[in-house]
Image (cartoon, helix red, strand yellow):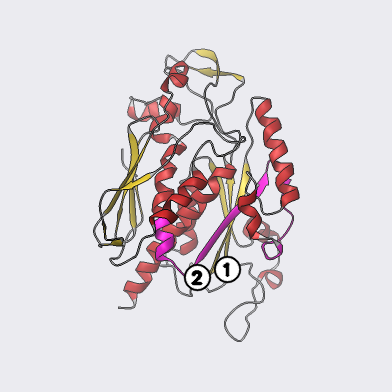
């Protein structure tokens, strides 16, 4: 299986399956001398881990990151940073009923057809459990990007949408509710919807918005390595993601050029930010703004018709512990992938000026 590495200069390779002994990763290219706050890494893991509230999967995992290499006396050495995260709470029997059955809209069928040997326990390598490795690596990247602030939050769950603009939000509210929406009233409505959906044995999707502040002018490598293209690739690599847009996104297609152009101030900043902080594939110093759409979780606690490995029509129903909505736990994953992209492009930009 190829495709397990991300990045060029700041590179992450992950390994492991949902119900194996452990998952983990290797970060290659992190500069030497970075004083790594391991506690901050663990704090990011706590934001992603399962079992953190009543509206997410109840799998109980401590998600403790154990660093194996690349650190000495609390600082990075410039050598590969290896880490592992043990799987402490597998319940593989929960998946025995899908050993030879394909869940609709899941990776079960495509993995089996491609490799002919599918780890059905929790989805194996296709499980969102793998994203814990990304969050650990992203927490390291965040510390490399000390002057850049990455803030993601839930902006929609199902048909419930956050109506306030980023500038009008109290970001301190994000971690005060299980949905991670910065508006308390909207968050309460979202939580009610998720609970209702869960009681029906169903699932629901949503949207994560991310704003990156403090990005210097000049990150991005045209023509084929535009910054927004890298961010899009990063977000679309996350489980359950169905869409990515930045700046004005698809809504910008309905505007005239005279409405959409970001006019300059004398200092190079712009009066509006339809560009989403990126022009010509290069950061322009304004806030980078993008949105990521997540589909409803494929595993339902309802009966559905599907096929088995023999091509026969059968009926199946999900069992075990699953998220009714992935969006609340996806917040730190979106931030982590953004941090990995920016760390990579920060190093690329630094090298281009040597």
Q: Quadrant of residue 304?
A: top right
Looking at the image, which is closer to me, 282 or 171? Answer: 171
Say if residue 15 shows up in the picture: no
Q: Residue at x 56, y 34 (%)?
A: 323
Residue 224, percent from left and from top: 41, 62
> Residue 213, relative to residue 21: is it above or below?
below
Q: Earlier in the sequence, mark 1 or mark 2?
A: 2
Q: Are marks 1 and 2 in contact (CB under 8 Å)?
A: yes
Q: Residue at x 68, y 26 (%)?
A: 199
Residue 62, percent from left and from top: 44, 39
Say if residue 142 shows up in the picture: yes
Find numbered disc 2 in the image and state the secondary structure of the residue it sits on: loop
Find numbered disc 1 in the image and state the secondary structure of the residue it sits on: loop
> Residue 185, relative to residue 344: is it above or below?
above
Which quadrant holds the N terminus?
A: top left
Q: Which residues are magenta?
A: 139-168
Q: Quadrant of residue 350?
A: bottom left
- The residue wearing badge 1 is 287
Labels in figure, total: 2
**Mark sitting on residue 215:** 2
Which quadrant holds the C terminus?
A: bottom left
> Residue 333, relative to residue 341: is it above or below?
above
Q: Is residue 119 magenta?
A: no
Q: Is residue 213 left or right of residue 260?
A: left
Residue 166, percent from left and from top: 67, 62
- Could you classify mark 1 by the number of other residues whose Cα lies within 10 Å: few (under 14), some (14-19), or many (20 or more)? many
């Amino acid at each position: 299986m190829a495709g397990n590495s991300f990045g060029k200069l700041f590179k992450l390779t992950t390994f492991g399956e949902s119900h194996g002994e452990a998952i983990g990763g290797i970060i290659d290219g992190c500069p030497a001398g970075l004083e790594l706050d391991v506690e901050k890494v663990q704090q990011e893991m706590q934001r992603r881990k399962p079992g953190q509230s009543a509206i997410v999967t109840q799998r109980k995992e401590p998600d403790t990151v154990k660093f194996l290499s690349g650190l000495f006396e609390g600082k990075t050495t410039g050598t590969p940073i290896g880490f592992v995260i043990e799987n402490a709470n597998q319940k593989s029997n929960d998946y025995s009923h899908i050993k030879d059955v394909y869940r609709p809209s899941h990776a079960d069928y495509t993995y089996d057809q491609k490799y002919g040997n599918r780890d059905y326990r929790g989805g194996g390598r296709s499980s969102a459990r793998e994203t814990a490795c990304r969050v650990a690596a992203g927490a390291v990247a965040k510390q490399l990007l000390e002057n850049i602030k990455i803030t993601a939050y839930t902006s929609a769950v199902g048909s419930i949408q956050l109506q306030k603009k980023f500038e009008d939000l109290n970001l301190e509210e994000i971690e005060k509710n299980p949905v991670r929406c910065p508006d308390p009233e909207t968050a309460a409505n979202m939580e009610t919807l998720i609970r209702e959906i869960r009681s029906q044995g169903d699932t629901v999707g949503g949207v994560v918005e991310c704003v990156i502040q403090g990005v210097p002018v000049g990150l991005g490598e045209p023509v084929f390595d535009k910054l927004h293209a890298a961010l899009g690739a990063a977000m679309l690599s996350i489980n359950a993601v169905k869409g990515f847009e930045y700046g004005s996104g698809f809504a910008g297609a309905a505007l005239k050029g005279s409405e959409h152009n970001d006019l300059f101030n004398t200092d190079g900043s712009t009066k509006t930010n339809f560009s989403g902080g990126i022009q010509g594939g290069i950061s322009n110093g304004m806030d980078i703004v993008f949105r990521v759409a997540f589909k409803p979780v494929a595993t339902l606690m309802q009966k559905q018709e599907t096929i088995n490995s023999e091509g026969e029509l059968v009926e199946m129903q999900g069992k075990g512990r699953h998220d009714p909505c992935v969006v609340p736990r996806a917040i730190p994953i979106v931030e982590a992938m953004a941090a990995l992209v920016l760390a990579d492009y920060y190093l690329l930009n630094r090298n281009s000026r040597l």
